Image (cartoon, rainbow, N blue to C red):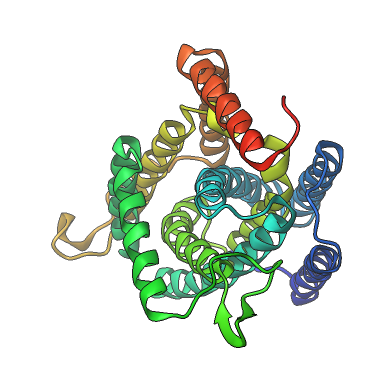
């Protein structure tokens, strides 16, 4: 098991914590819709920061654990990009003003970090005491991969609408936003704004993604430190990536299929690892299954990167991706016409 100097771990979290705090203060102090240039510079900064940290990991811990971090970061970044599809739907459904979408995304990222931190601590504790948990993690990822591959998203939308209807029936709520506030005053009474429902929806979405993503990265490394830092770097810059990619997200029609393949691959990897380390008495008499291969980290990394690259290229070149682009442009023009913005 990987053991890093305590000072290195604490220093890493302090530096990253300060960066996130400054980012949060910037959003709260100056809410705005970032330009493509601004969003691109921030994404480049956070990706560069992750690559610098990867280089430090290679230097401090060697290629095995450095490779585990890169594989974990790429996987979590890919799964986090999948979050953006849902965020786009949430923002559009609740008509969140573009000016305040940064704040919503930042709150979502903080919620995601808290939830993933809890799941990481639980996962690390389970793995250190019960090696057979890999069987469960692996089976869960295979089940998730199957449902993600065939999911159209329509059922999810219906469930969200029912939840929203119940909340509106229980809580006094205004019809319109009041900046980024959760509470406002209407006719002398304090009521909630629709921003509350947006935050709740984002939080529930983050919970679902945490349940999927944490078992996935534990299939690549057993180090809680690597798991958490990979998640942290994946979520940092996600807000700016939302504005940078914009309509491009709707064109990545094969990304969900690529992610289902990656989850299935990691699920098989986990089950093979569980078989190799088997201690369950009713499987092979409680003995290790020696023929079960252990997939090296560099193989996992190569498979993950290749799957994502193929999916992105196929999406951008396929007729389905081009149709999605056209639909997105028509929807954007309709939204601009509704709000009185400039035509494209």
Q: Which residue is painted at 49% across and 17% down in the image?
A: 323
Q: Residue most toward the front?
A: 187
Q: Position of residue 194 (x, y in %)?
A: 54, 67
Count of picture labels: 0
Observer able to see residue 85: yes
Q: Is residue 164 left or right of residue 1?
A: left
Looking at the image, which is closer to me, 174 or 38? 174
Observer able to see residue 310: no
Looking at the image, which is closer to me, 154 or 286? 154
Q: Which residue is painted at 50% across and 46% down in the image?
A: 89
Q: Position of residue 209 (x, y in %)?
A: 46, 56
Q: Position of residue 63 (x, y in %)?
A: 69, 45
Q: Is residue 322 left or right of residue 163?
A: right
Q: Is residue 220 left or right of residue 16?
A: left
Q: Which quadrant would the N terminus be assigned to in this image?
A: bottom right
Looking at the image, which is closer to me, 222 or 265? 265
Where is 116 relative to 247, above or below? Answer: below
Q: Which quadrant would the C terminus be assigned to in this image?
A: top right
Q: Position of residue 328 (x, y in %)?
A: 56, 28
Q: Which residue is painted at 68% across and 36% down in the image?
A: 245
In the figure, residue 297 lies in which quadrant?
top right
Q: Is residue 324 left or right of residue 235?
A: left
Q: Which residue is painted at 64% across and 62% down in the image?
A: 104
In the figure, residue 298 lies in which quadrant?
top right
Where is 274 relative to 241, above or below? Answer: below
């Amino acid at each position: 098991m990987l053991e890093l100097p305590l000072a290195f771990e604490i220093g890493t979290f302090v530096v990253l914590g300060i960066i996130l705090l400054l980012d949060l203060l910037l959003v709260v102090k100056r809410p705005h819709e970032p330009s493509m240039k601004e969003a691109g510079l921030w994404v480049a900064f956070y990706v560069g920061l992750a690559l610098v940290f990867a280089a430090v990991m290679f230097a401090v811990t060697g290629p095995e654990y450095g490779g585990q971090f890169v594989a974990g970061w790429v996987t979590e970044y890919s799964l986090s990009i999948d979050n953006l599809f849902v965020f786009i739907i949430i923002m559009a459904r609740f008509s969140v003003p573009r000016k305040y979408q940064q704040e919503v995304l930042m709150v979502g990222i903080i919620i995601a970090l808290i939830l993933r931190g809890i799941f990481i601590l639980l996962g690390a504790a389970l793995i250190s005491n019960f090696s057979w948990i890999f069987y469960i993690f692996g089976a869960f990822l295979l089940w998730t991969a199957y449902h993600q591959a065939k999911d159209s998203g329509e059922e999810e939308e219906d469930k969200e609408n029912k939840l929203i209807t119940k909340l509106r029936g229980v809580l006094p709520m205004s019809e319109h936003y009041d900046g980024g506030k959760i509470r406002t005053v209407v006719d002398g009474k304090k009521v909630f704004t629709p921003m509350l429902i947006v935050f709740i929806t984002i939080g529930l979405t983050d919970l679902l993604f945490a349940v999927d993503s944490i078992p996935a990265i534990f299939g690549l490394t057993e180090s809680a430190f690597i798991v958490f830092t990979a998640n942290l770097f994946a979520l940092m810059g996600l807000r700016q990536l939302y504005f940078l990619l914009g309509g491009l997200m709707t064109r990545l029609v094969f990304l969900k299929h690529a992610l289902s393949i990656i989850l299935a691959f990691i699920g098989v990897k986990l089950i093979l690892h569980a078989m190799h380390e088997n201690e369950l008495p009713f499987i092979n008499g409680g003995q290790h299954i020696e023929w079960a291969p252990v997939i090296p980290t560099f193989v996992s990394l190569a498979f993950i990167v290749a799957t994502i690259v193929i999916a992105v290229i196929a999406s951008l070149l396929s007729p389905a991706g081009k149709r999605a682009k056209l639909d997105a442009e028509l929807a954007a023009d309709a939204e601009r016409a509704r709000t009185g913005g400039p035509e494209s």
